[in-house]
Amino acid sequence: MESLSDTQWDVVISGTGLQQSLLALALSRSGKNILHVDPNDYYGGPEAAFSLPEADEWAERHRADGRDGSLFAGAEVKREADGLASPRAYTLALAPQLIHSRSKLVSQLVDSKAFRHIEFLAVGSFFIYQPPSEASSASLSRIPSTREDVFSNTAIPARSKRSLMKFLKFVLDFDSEPRTDVWHPHTDEPLDVFLASQFKLDSALQSYIITLTLSQDGKVSVKDGLTTIHRHLTSMGVFGPGFAAVYPKWGGLSEVAQVGCRAAAVGGAVYMLGTGIKHVRKAQSEDAQTEANLEIELTNDMVVNTKRLVKGSEQSTASQRISRLTAVTKSDFSSLFELQTEGAPIPAVTVVAFPAGSVSTEEGKSSEYPVYALVHSSDTGECPSGQFVIYLTTVHDASSKSILEKALSSLVAAVQGDDEASPSPCIYQLYYDQCGGTPSLVVDDSTATFPLPPVDLAFNDSILDTVQEAWNMVMGGSNEEGDEYMKFDDREGGNDDDAFD
């Protein structure tokens, strides 16, 4: 271990969250001396995925109320005595996110060859929860997002179908003239108002469109909404018919983070889990050949010297805060994964949206914000066969925990036809609050700090900009060898079966 102290490191990376791990991937063929540490004893940071014992241990460490500015807070576990398989048969993601097929992340994983070590699964239909009424029980309505979907939908009147088709055609080419003349004057206005005034869409069709944006608070601007819907529609069919987004098997973004770290390790990076940073100070070496700018004392009392330090934010000052409820159930949700398009792969993930006001607490308080439920089948590798994992999310407020629990039982009732008053047949539940940030790298001399990851339900490509900024800093702002960022040729003699080619 003494050799680590003697090495002049080009960069020390602290934390193995997605941003740090993508940086490690980008540097994996740079020839730089890289020391990658993490105070946790697991990979993935805020994007980690846990077995049940690991989730229990993690929840115990994050029971506090979050007033100290911590990233996660208010964690609580509930479990049933029977029904759970082996604890290691589960892999629960802390921050599950969909990745649209045209996401910049997918392109970078392809260019860097990392995609060969990730199994991507199809994300299927999007549904909207319809509350029970005097005339009908609770149900789920599937959202049409293609021309074929619209015309085959029997719940939408013919006149409304024409209005919806007009909007879908508009979005596909929204950023070119003359369409820009239509929406530019309304850039910052609410999307639902724009949909009503410009396309005569009723409230039901507005909710369909807003749901496809995956907006956490349901208050999306015209510009952001059109951009997001365009990404969704143009992603449809890229990797096969019938789906617009994918999800990495075995824990989502956690798997991407681990692939990045493995690539860096193959490239010569040194990894130390369970080791964090205690102190950072300017290097005081009198050796003229020493290029290190920083002297870092690790939590194991080792001192290392480095030119650059890249780390993640440890505390939050952001106002963006959500509540999450992860549930494992034995209820049969297979009806949500039925194929809607001939030749499409069987989806492993489906999305259910609960519009604001569609569920209420036991005290009668209606939900102020939408609730989203990502339903995962056992094909994701996150639970045993015959069980499902449901990831529910809503904007945090005083009643968000009760709202999520009500949404969970309402979802089960809508799919199974169960009595909503009966207990939800879930065998494991993990509740917690999470803070998010706005992607912006903070650079202070030789130290760069990644922001908290955003809490979006679909991967936010702006994260990748901060990673490239950090890469430029580590590379010194120049690249003498002319290598392109995240674009790697196959290693000589390498093949798809290599540990990491």
Image (tube, grey):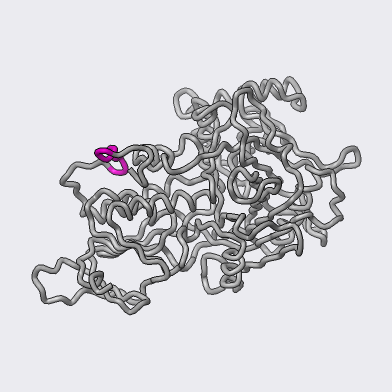
Identify which residue, 501 or 112, lies in the foreground.
501
Left or right of 446? Residue 124 is right
- In the rendered structure, does residue 491 fall within the stretch colored magenta? yes
In this picture, which residue range is highlighted in magenta? 485-493
Q: Main secondary structure of the magenta part?
A: loop
**Picture quadrant of residue 422:** bottom right
Count of all numbered marks drawn on residues in the image? 0
From this viewpoint, is residue 167 visible? no
Spot occupied by residue 113 in the image (x, y as percentages of width and height): 36, 40
In the displayed structure, 75 sits above or below 339; it is below
Q: Quadrant of the N terminus?
A: bottom left
Who's the residue at 33% across and 37% down the image? 495
- In the rendered structure, does residue 210 fall within the stretch colored magenta? no
Left or right of 114? Residue 219 is right
In the displayed structure, 201 sits above or below 374; it is above
Q: Residue lying farthest bottom?
A: 301
